Image: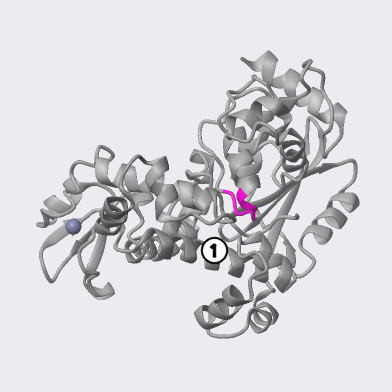
Amino acid sequence: MTSTNLTFPMLTASAILTNETLRTMPARSNSAKLGEARSGSGDDQRWNAVLARDAAHDGQFVFAVSSTGVYCRPSCAARRPRRENVAFYSRPEQAEKAGFRACLRCRPRSVSGNPQSDWAKEVCRYIEQHLDEPVTLERLGKVFRQSPFHLQRRFKATLGITPRAYGDSCRLRLLKRNLQAGDSVTRAMYDAGYGSSSRLYEKTASQLGMTPDKYRRGAIAATVRYAIADSPLGRMLVAATDKGVCAIQFARSDGELIEGLKREFPFAVRKPDQGGLQGWVETLLSTMTGHELNAALPLDIRATAFQRRVWTYLQSIPFGATRSYSQVAKAIGQPSASRAVARACATNPVAVAIPCHRVVREDGSISGYRWGVERKKALLEMEQRGV
Ligand SMILES: [Zn+2]
């Protein structure tokens, strides 16, 4: 499938609502300009994370409620305050300096170490990676070694919704993204994990407030900005939505690149970038020439559940190292899926950022790269020289 807007990997409900990036850390220092330009929407994103009780944001900020004088972590199970009573702080100390005290329920001071939310995050991730399969409470119970009853209760106490409702919200979100990108309704439903069930179709229509077809017609005009630069692999195009990088492509000429972008985003408004993408372009260039990326780029791409499993794994392959297709298949728990892994690599919409070039044949030989074997070879050589 082609790519567009689904940031990846989706970690939790609001990851899905806002920025479900491969935990999209902001791009490095040189993205300061972007950061400023977006600080207004930053609060909106935080607020979305709060509304979604997004445990993935725990530790990234706390929110303080003026009507109660208490501050909480984003995933706190307490009732949501009114937006106008909420202020955001990056660190608990700042909230305390401003006169707020820590919530006794979510204990925002003990951040990453909150076993409850770490656990819930893992359950979320499992659900996200299996949206195309029936994930029953029984199955979750087996995977996480708990009785279905306790698992559900614990999940709900942490996130405020049941695992099933969480899966539903992920699918719906994905469906919207796919429809926005211009996919046919059938395709969009299928790729979002709905299969071809007419019961689900009806349910979806009621959740969207209209039929998927109507939603699609209204929503496909996203804006994609793009920049083209010289790279060691020829001309490079980096394209982004307002949520993150959605395409990284290589070609010999700019015309070819622009054609490629058009094929990938036929419905989008495609605009040359006015300098805002420069930081990300520089980050990519320095990665390619052998400097390890120390912060992931925010990505905004669509993926099937299977692609998500593969691409997430690819991001864990160390800089300069390689894996074979069958090693990847084994690592994602589907040892017989080497061919599907190869396909997932070949459809990676963001070259280099998702390092599909680090997957090679069994015997170590280099084959199959969407942007040509020569480029793959060159990339690996630069990486291996760099380490
Ligand atoms: Zn709280």
**Colouring mode (rainbow / by chain / secondary structure / one colour):** one colour
Q: Is residue 148 shown above or below 335?
A: below
Name the spot of residue 21 as percent of width and height, x first.
Answer: 53, 49
As drawn, is 102 to the left or to the right of 52?
Answer: left
Q: Quadrant of ligand 1?
A: bottom left
In what element is the residue under mark 1? helix
- Type of residue at label 1? Arg
Name the spot of residue 282 as percent of width and height, x first.
Answer: 64, 38
* Observer-nearest of 16 and 272: 16
Image quadrant assignment for residue 319 = top right
**Neighbour tally class for label 1: few under 14, some 14-19, many 20 plus, Cα within 10 Å:** many
> Residue sitting at 69 percent across and 29 percent down?
288
Image quadrant assignment for residue 235 = top right
> Residue sitting at 24 percent across and 63 percent down?
87
* Observer-nearest of 237 and 113: 113
Q: Is residue 185 magenta?
A: no
As drawn, is 250 to the left or to the right of 164?
Answer: right
> Residue sitting at 79 percent across and 38 percent down?
230
Q: Is residue 303 magenta?
A: yes
Q: Principal SS element in the magenta part?
A: loop
Name the spot of residue 105 as percent of width and height, x first.
Answer: 14, 55
Is residue 59 visible in the rendered image? The answer is no
What residue is shown with label 1? 171
Name the spot of residue 152 as percent of width and height, x first.
Answer: 31, 56
Magenta region:
299-305
Is residue 179 visible in the rendered image? The answer is yes
Q: Quadrant of the N terminus?
A: bottom right
Q: Is residue 315 shown above or below 97?
A: above
Q: Quadrant of the C terminus?
A: top right
